[in-house]
Image: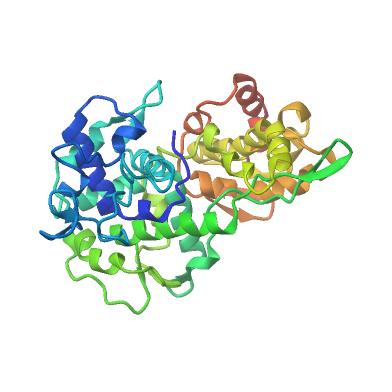
Amino acid sequence: MSALINRVPTGRIASLHAELQYLQWRFGHKPFSLMEMKLDPTLKKTQLDFYILAVRHSKWGSYNGRYDPFLRNRLDRAGFHLTQSTVRDTQKSKSVSECFNALEALGWIERTPDRLGKITALGTRVARLNYEDPKFLPLLRSSILAYGPFVGFLSEAIRTQKSGVFKRNGIFIGYPQTGEFITVGGERVPLSVGSQADSVTRTRSALVAWAMTAGYLWPRGVPHPKNEKLWHVEVLPVLQGKWPWSSFELLVPADFLEKAPPVSRPLDYIAMTKSTKALRERGQSGIRSATMGVESLVKNRRLAIVYALASASVLGQSVSVAALIAQLGKYPKLFVVEKKDFRHVLLQELPIAHTAGVPYLQQGDRLMPLVRCSPDTVAKGAPIEVVTAIKGMLSSVLL
């Protein structure tokens, strides 16, 4: 499974690498829990012992004379901004959960059947390298190009660029806002199926940082790193400060994704909708209840879009939007929330393909996939009857 990352600290590859090396030191090939991913001051080593950006000072910090420069208070018991610690977690495990998602997105760890984490073969290779090693950069590039949302982000950067420059705010990577309402107890209740603006901003910031670290884009007006083989190292001073840039130079050609390897870690069925946990706050229980009531329909229709495009990508074909809408309408119990709004809603949902990792170019009614992706990968976790229905309509939908 790959989830959509949406916290800024996950954008710092050096932090993720330190966490991975810590997990390798502590667990090797054994599984670990979220709690065990946090900084533990009782152990002889912490993440800061592996962190290239950790600051050494004999008077500051309680972790072997090191502290994390991204924590405002040098004596903060949270210890490590990426995961927080076992003795102080200001984010109630949100930070470590997002760290897990980011490491999984890179393919450096995997989720076990009992919901623990385990380092992959790729992760072992990465963990054995020092961050300053020139061999690290090629592994990083292959890692991020396998993650669906990053590929969708890069595709949008290429599409929106003008003379090699693009605006960050012009890119949307998140769950589409459909503006839907359903009737509950005689009242019209809005559904919360789309990403809020702040969530989109956080996701975009993290992916921008990944792209900068890998050398795929660069802030306009900022001097470029000089050593191509150590680009990921020379970018560190730039990423240590705030990330205020709005315009970026695109450092890859327009046909870059056409030559890229297949996307092996797209968002799958489970990750086709955002978490509804936050809707418990601010009196949104009614919206949460209504949204959860139709969540499976939202996942199903989003899967249909992404699955059709993934199928087209491996067959060298394209997708007819009109045919897809018509075919999905034949299965109202699987795909339709409100019949009268269905066509409009599905048109609003199309960008889920960019977020999932099967970006497309649209020409009229035709959606042409820009990368290759296995449909079986995006269907992971989906109900058999939903996948069967989607497969049955492909002959009518693919062009």
- Left or right: residue 158 versus residue 291 is left
Based on the displayed image, in which of its 4 quarters is residue 182 positioned?
A: top right
Q: Is residue 1 above or below residue 249?
A: above
- Is 115 in front, or is 255? 115
Q: How is the image coloured?
A: rainbow
- Is 218 in front, or is 79? 79
Residue 30: x and y, percent? Answer: 24, 24
Residue 157: x and y, percent? Answer: 47, 62
- Left or right: residue 96 versus residue 182 is left
User: Can the viewer see residue 323?
Assistant: no
Q: Quarter of the image for the N terminus: give it.
A: top left
The extreme bottom residue here reads 221
User: Can the viewer see residue 170?
Assistant: yes
Q: Is residue 236 above or below residue 355?
A: below
**Picture mark count:** 0
Q: Residue at x 51, y 62 (%)?
A: 159
- Left or right: residue 315 versus residue 80 is right
Q: Residue at x 19, y 71 (%)?
A: 226
Q: Is residue 236 above or below residue 39?
A: below
Q: Residue at x 16, y 54 (%)?
A: 66
The extreme right residue here reads 186
- Is 317 in front, or is 293? 293
Residue 205: x and y, percent? Answer: 43, 60
Residue 37: x and y, percent? Answer: 30, 37
- Is 33 in front, or is 258? 33
